[in-house]
Amino acid sequence: MSAPAGHRNGWRIIVTDDNPAKLCTVTQTLRDAGHYVFAAYDGESALELVVQLPDIDLLITNTRLGVVDGPELMRLVRLMWPELAMLHVVHADEADGGVPPGVPSLREPFTPGQLLMVVGSLLA
């Protein structure tokens, strides 16, 4: 992975969530803000996107994703690209455990503005 690509007309972000409605909301919020967003419905698909897409700036994931859960996805990505920014979205009924050190969490419910503020601070 190269340096962050945000100097282009938006950041390149992979978003994954097991809930299609939440995935759509986060994806659309980020796209409306001018970012290039790639959506994945499970950890395996998100990992494939990280491997295949160059110059990803941020990975946003939740915990429950199927065979490869969020914390495992983040650990695998961290091994390959230690500098890639990541954000863990925590469902209201979940603990915040298993996330690699240094990965911030955003607890649901959150507003679009809160999401954009956290994403902006991670990629600044």
Image (tube, grey):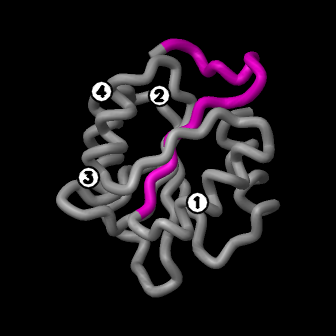
Q: Is residue 6 magenta?
A: yes
Q: Label 4, on which residue?
A: 80
Depth order, front residue of 113/53: 53
Q: Label 3, on which residue?
A: 72
Q: Give the amino acid at mark 3.
A: Glu
Mark 2 or mark 3: which comes first in sequence? 3
**Contact (Cβ within 8 Å) of mark 1 with mark 2:** no
Determine the CA span between mark 1 and mark 2.
26 Å
Q: Between label 2 and label 3, give the one nearer the viewer.
A: 3
Determine the CA span between mark 4 and mark 1.
27 Å
Residue 73: x and y in percent read: 30, 48
Mark 3 or mark 1: which comes first in sequence? 1
Image height of 39 relative to 79, above or below: below
Image height of 104 relative to 64, above or below: above
Q: Is residue 47 magenta?
A: no
Query: Farthest left residue?
Result: 67
**Contact (Cβ within 8 Å) of mark 4 with mark 2:** no
Depth order, front residue of 76/49: 49
Query: Farthest top residue?
Result: 2
Residue 24 bears which disc, if any?
1
